[in-house]
Amino acid sequence: MNALLIDKLKKYFGKTKAVDGISFEVAEGEIFGFLGPNGAGKTTTIRGIMDFLRPTSGKISIFGMDSKKQSVLAKSNIGYMPADVRLYDGWTGKSHIEFLEKIHGKKSIAHELIQKFDFNAKIKFKNLSTGNKRKLGLILALMFEPKLVILDEPTAGLDPILQNVVYEVLEDFFKKGISIFMSSHNLAEVERICHRVAIIRQGKIVAIENIQNLKNNRMHLATARFEKKPAKGEFRFDGIEVQEELPDGYILNIKGDINPLLNKISKYKIKDLEITHASLEEVFLEFYK
Amino acid sequence: MFALIISTIKDRKLSTLIYCISVLLFILMFVSIFPTIQSQSANLEEILKFYPESMMKAFNIDIKAYTTIGGYISGELFSFMWPIMFISYICGFAGSALAGEIEKGTIEVLLSQPISRAKIYFAKYFAGLAMILVFVFVSVFSIPLILKFYHLTIDIKNVIAIFNLSLLWGLAIYSLGFFFSSIFSDKGKVYFLLGGLLVLMFALNIISGLKENLGDLKYLSFFYYFNANNALIYNKVDYLAYWVFGSSSIFFTFLGLEIFNKRNITT
């Protein structure tokens, strides 16, 4: 059974197509990344999963339960942290924790998380720093050890040390078999902890890839300098893009097989040739275009 | 649901305390000057005889207002000051209950828990209702207690009558405010619309008394049915008041629930 199943989800706000027919699934025990530029539809998708927004059409299932019709049951399996953590200003962290424990009718592991994150639960929310607000948001999302954790930019605004603590906690949760769905702009974070990633752009999914495959199918960057510089048009073929023109050559972006390019440039007298792997960031940015 | 009711009440306990103390101080002030007013009642009756009847009717002025303690309390407290305080209190609560939570973004804390929207709605509603009950109880039942200090008495049946009327009137306004709170995503709009509508109702009630051909407009006003004079002087509450306030409360409460259940909530 999938932890999360999104099937042809659409959410329109009047004429604006915030999410336009996306489908993907998150397997049980998987850490799934959700990437996209600002305004791509990430938060709209997450709000649809959480039943804050009602889909225009399509289906969302959480462990086989309809997110709308069985919302209460589905949410008993979810821990959620929004991108912008907004809680009750006059309440302390402890008040928030106790409130949620009363709603859930059970005790939690908040105390352990408080120690792990080194969080002071006695301070009122309005007096917390941005980082500490996010710590509290994470504690509230994780305290009942939910089967599915949904995080919207979990480490935004956190210092690198705390980011590492968060990754360690998420990895601990993953070892317990908990599924994690997280949206992020932090590519290093996605590379570190996610198993698969979906990339959304203008309301549509443009790629769903295994992180390892993405690393394996990297783009290459070739800097070629020639004795006699060939015309730019010589390098217009599939998978090749002239990124920059040099006085005596070109910097070329290669997607996929590099052999066609090597065959091409070998016809010319080469002064210098350098081929490097494009970074994962450059790979993702290709999808963002 | 119970946890949410209690937490909501706790969050509003200070404002409820302030409103209750304020109304007690007003009652104390009015009661303390009643002996002076009563001693001048003959003069006041003479003055009121020259008031146009339409004006008396429009502003619900009764000759007995200054000659009996019930009428006096009705005229001084329940005709203007108390309704304003009560409406202000209700607006604040209704506006912040749902629209305020959406505006602050805290609604996501509630919506992300395994609790239905209907439970959230009714938890907030009942919390407000409990606070309204406290305010009305303190306002009304403090009257006979304060009167005792001044060796004055009022028929307890009249006090119960004004308690019932005030509670129902408040419930109708609160339900209307809660309905607006379920539609909007900021509390300012709730205050504006609810306040505006009540001002309009007040104006309709006055105009209907001044112009005979506009007499029927009064039926559109909650203020018409809130006849504190009849309750406190004559122990009378028009059954139409019960019907109008009761049915309005039920209608707006469930319409608000339906809207809150179906709407998109974006913070």
Image: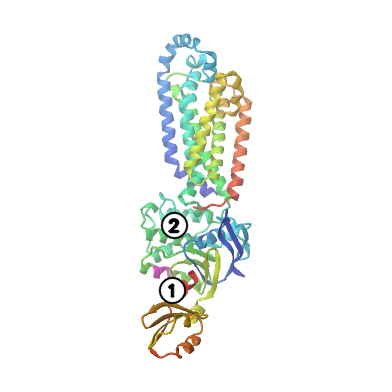
Q: Which residue is mark 2?
A: A85
Q: Is residue A164 magenta?
A: yes
Whichever of labels 2 and 1 marks the residue nearer the N terminus, that label is: 2
Tell me the quarter of the picture where residue A266 sits. bottom left
Give the vertical position of B92 relative to B263 (above or below).
above
Front-lying residue, A174 or B247: B247
Tell me if A36 is positioned left or right of B212 in this view. left
Percent across and percent down for residue A40 are: 51, 63
Residue drawn at 44 percent across, 13 percent down: B38
Give the overall secondary structure of the magenta segment: helix
Amino acid carrying mark 2 in the image: Val
Separation of residues labelled 2 and 1 (CA atoms): 27 Å
Element type at mark 1: helix
Tell me if A186 is positioned left or right of B235 in this view. left
Q: Any mark on residue A180, and which?
A: none
Query: Mark 2 falls within which chain?
Result: A
Give the vertical position of A257 relative to A202 (above or below).
below
Give the vertical position of A109 relative to B191 (above or below).
below
2 and 1 marks in contact (CB < 8 Å): no
Query: Mark 1 falls within which chain?
Result: A
Q: Which residue is mark 1?
A: A281
Element type at mark 2: loop
Q: Give, as a single range, the part of the protein colored magenta.
A: A163-167
Using the rendered image of the protein, determine whether residue B231 is visible from the camera's viewpoint: no
- Point out the frontmost of discs 2 and 1: 1
Question: Do dots 2 and 1 share one subunit?
Answer: yes
